[in-house]
Image (cartoon, grey):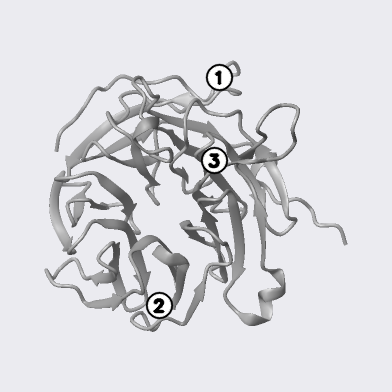
Amino acid sequence: MSFFGSSTSGTLGSAAAAEKDIEVADPPTDSISSLAFSPSADYLAVGSWDNNVRIYEVGTNGQTQGKAMYPHQGPVLSVCWNRDGSKILSGGADNAGRMFDVTTGQASQVAQHDAPIKVVRWIESPQGSVLATGSWDKTVKYWDLRTPTPVSTVQLPERCYTLDVVFPLMVVGTAERHIQVFNLQNPTTPFKTLVSPLKWQTRVVSCFPSANGFAVGSIEGRVAIQYVEEKDSSNNFSFKCHRRDQSPTTKDQSLVYAVNDISFHPVHGTFSTCGSDGTINFWDKDARTRLKSFEPAPGPVPCTAFNRTGTIFAYAVSYDWSKGHSGMTPGHPNKLMLHACKDDEVKRKQTKR
């Protein structure tokens, strides 16, 4: 377990800082790929293309302190926690899933694929706990951490790009716009297979906290809200976001950016979107309205996360390769930010009767 700089950043508490988001001290040294808060305390796990997972403690006023760090042998693409917050799970371009034990400070390999692991998610079920890993080898594997081989393997139609779980719902988004919906009571057979309602490549899927539907974000500045059951399908819709006008005089919205991440608020069920345009929005899907727009960040926002109580919203600002190699300019910002959520930003609008 390696520790790193113990300097603290600003605070979220003081009146002067209340309007300003806090920059976390000692961020990763390369683009940030994944963020996840502990379900039991304000600890933030951060995966990066610098091959490391870092764990930060976030104090009551937003001050942060690096607590631990452990390595992969390639870029880290995804991080998550187990239910009691005692373990961090991560997957990366080294084709390995790794587990970090918070109490002992020990890291160990717990999963293996034939290609990079794009997503890791913890599944807590009445039958027990398993780790789900989605890979570019076109499989999802379920792992009981006590055994070195997977409990079962699911063949996907294509490479796994994104995966999310809110038990008993699991949704997997792959290349070629396939989406597979699983009822985890029957984890090896898809409950439903569909083509994404969006016309372009799937970037992210995120399950509703109520587990009755999911949001899909694409590379073409668009989000779809999808319910699982046919009886709710009249509530399905999609909307444009993360677009800009070519010039101040033309309202053409012709500059289109990828939707990189979608995070649902744990209490109110509202959600955030972030994009390659450096903007973040909070939305209420039921009122079909935008609750908040952030000031544009100085670079793409690749990933976001709410803490367990929904009072802190973390987001990264780093290059997401949306413009390929030419966009990787020297001095590109690589930051980790914390935003103190106000009620009116994240609470649902009262729907008119």
Distance CA(mark 1)–CA(mark 3): 15 Å
* Residue located at (72% from left, 26% from top): 248
| Residue 100 horizontal side relative to residue 28, left or right | left
Disc 1, SS: loop
**Gap in angstroms between the C-alphas marked 2 and 3:** 30 Å
Quadrant for the N terminus in the image: top left
Q: Amino acid at mark 1?
A: Ala
Q: Earlier in the sequence, mark 1 or mark 2?
A: 1
Q: Which mark is residue 126?
A: none
Instruction: Report the front residue among 215 and 184.
Output: 215
The mark closer to the camera, 2 or 3, is 2
Q: In the picture, which quadrant includes the C terminus?
A: bottom right
Is residue 265 visible in the rendered structure shown here?
yes
Report the residue marked by disc 3: 311
**In percent of the image, x 40 and y 52: which residue is there?**
39
Q: Which residue is mark 1?
A: 17
- The tag earlier along the polypeptide, 2 or 3, is 2
- Work out whether 100 lies above or below 15: below
At label 3, the amino acid type is Thr
Which residue is located at x 20 percent, y 47 percent? 103
- On screen, 158 above or below 338? below
The crowd level at tag 3 (other Cα within 10 Å; few <14, some 14-19, many 20+) is some
Indicate the secondary structure of the residue bearing disc 3: loop
What is the tally of numbered marks visible in this picture? 3
Q: Which residue is mark 2?
A: 184
Coordinates of residue 352 in the picture (x, y in percent):
86, 57
Q: Is residue 286 left or right of residue 155?
A: right
Q: Is residue 216 above or below residue 56?
A: below
| Residue 287 point in image, percent of width and height | 75, 56
Mark 1, other Cα within 10 Å: few <14 / some 14–19 / many ≥20: some
